[in-house]
């Protein structure tokens, strides 16, 4: 991450107050980024987004249009956020009543969140997890889980390549060749 935004593209109709933007990041029209936000390399922040101060966005992240990322949201590398994903940061909001700190929401490496999903504050979306469009996430979603609905529930598991995994005797081999095991409610990739 560079200490200035000289090596990224900022649309002339964007307001970018932070200097903590990585190389080759693109920030499009009507985006407003506050001064303390940190954005990694090779990100794409699409039109009509707002990014608050206590926000970290890793490398290679796609933030589609209409997303507001509030204080307390931490997004790791290679994450996809579909259009109009909603993050909350206050579980008990009241006008003019401010919590001492906001709930920390973490979207882990490689996760994808479908359009119009709501992520309630304080939850973790696991590595390579997929949240289906229109879902409401009210609890943590584990690594590789495919979750959707209101509230979002685990409906299966997916490979890093996004193919759905079929477990036989607690093991799965994806069509791409990656291997996984399922044990004690946790999916992990087998390195062979």
Image (cartoon, helix red, strand yellow):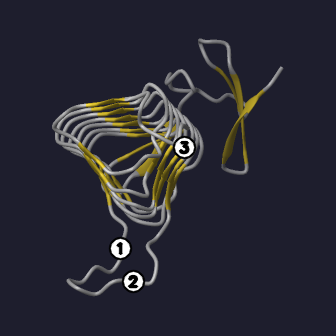
Find disc 2 in the rendering and name its residue: 99
Question: Residue 90 — which label?
Answer: 1
- Considering every residue shown, the one lying at the far top of the view is 176
**Mark 3 or mark 1, earlier in chain:** 3
- Considering every residue shown, the one lying at the far bottom of the view is 97
Residue in the image at 38% along x and 56% along y? 35
Q: Residues within 10 Å of mark 1 (few under 14, many from 20)?
A: some
Secondary structure beneath dot 1 equals: loop
Could you say which quadrant of the image residue 169 lies in? top right
Secondary structure beneath dot 3 equals: loop
- Considering every residue shown, the one lying at the far right of the view is 192
Q: Are marks 2 and 3 in contact (CB under 8 Å)?
A: no
Residue in the image at 62% along x and 18% along y? 174
Instruction: Compute the Cα span from label 2 to label 3.
Output: 25 Å
Q: Are marks 2 and 1 in contact (CB under 8 Å)?
A: yes
Find disc 3 in the rendering and name its residue: 76
In the image, residue 160 sits, relative to residue 127, either above or below, namely above
Residue in the image at 44% along x and 27% along y? 7
Q: Is residue 91 rendered to the left or right of residue 15?
A: right
Where does residue 25 sit, x and y in percent of width and height?
A: 41, 30
Where does residue 98 sit, x and y in percent of width and height?
A: 33, 83
**Mark 2 or mark 3, earlier in chain:** 3
Q: Residue 104 or 141: which is nearer the viewer?
A: 104
């Amino acid at each position: 991450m560079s200490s200035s935004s000289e090596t990224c593209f900022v649309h002339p109709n964007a307001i970018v107050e932070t200097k903590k933007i990585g190389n080759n990041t693109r920030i499009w029209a009507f985006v407003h980024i506050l001064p303390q936000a940190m954005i990694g390399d090779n990100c794409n922040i699409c039109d009509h987004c707002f990014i608050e101060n206590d926000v970290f966005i890793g490398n290679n992240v796609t933030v589609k249009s209409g997303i507001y990322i509030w204080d307390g949201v931490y997004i790791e590398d290679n994450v996809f956020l579909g259009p109009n994903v909603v993050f909350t940061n206050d579980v008990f909001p009241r006008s003019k009543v401010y919590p001492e700190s906001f709930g920390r929401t973490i979207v882990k490496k490689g996760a994808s969140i479908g359009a119009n999903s709501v992520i309630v504050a304080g939850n973790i979306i696991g590595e390579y997890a997929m949240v289906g469009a229109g879902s409401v996430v009210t609890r943590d979603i584990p690594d590789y889980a495919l979750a959707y609905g209101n509230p979002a529930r685990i409906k299966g598991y997916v490979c890093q390549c996004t193919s759905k995994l079929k477990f036989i005797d607690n093991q799965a081999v994806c069509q791409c060749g990656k291997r996984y095991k399922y044990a004690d409610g946790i999916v992990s990739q087998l390195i062979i």
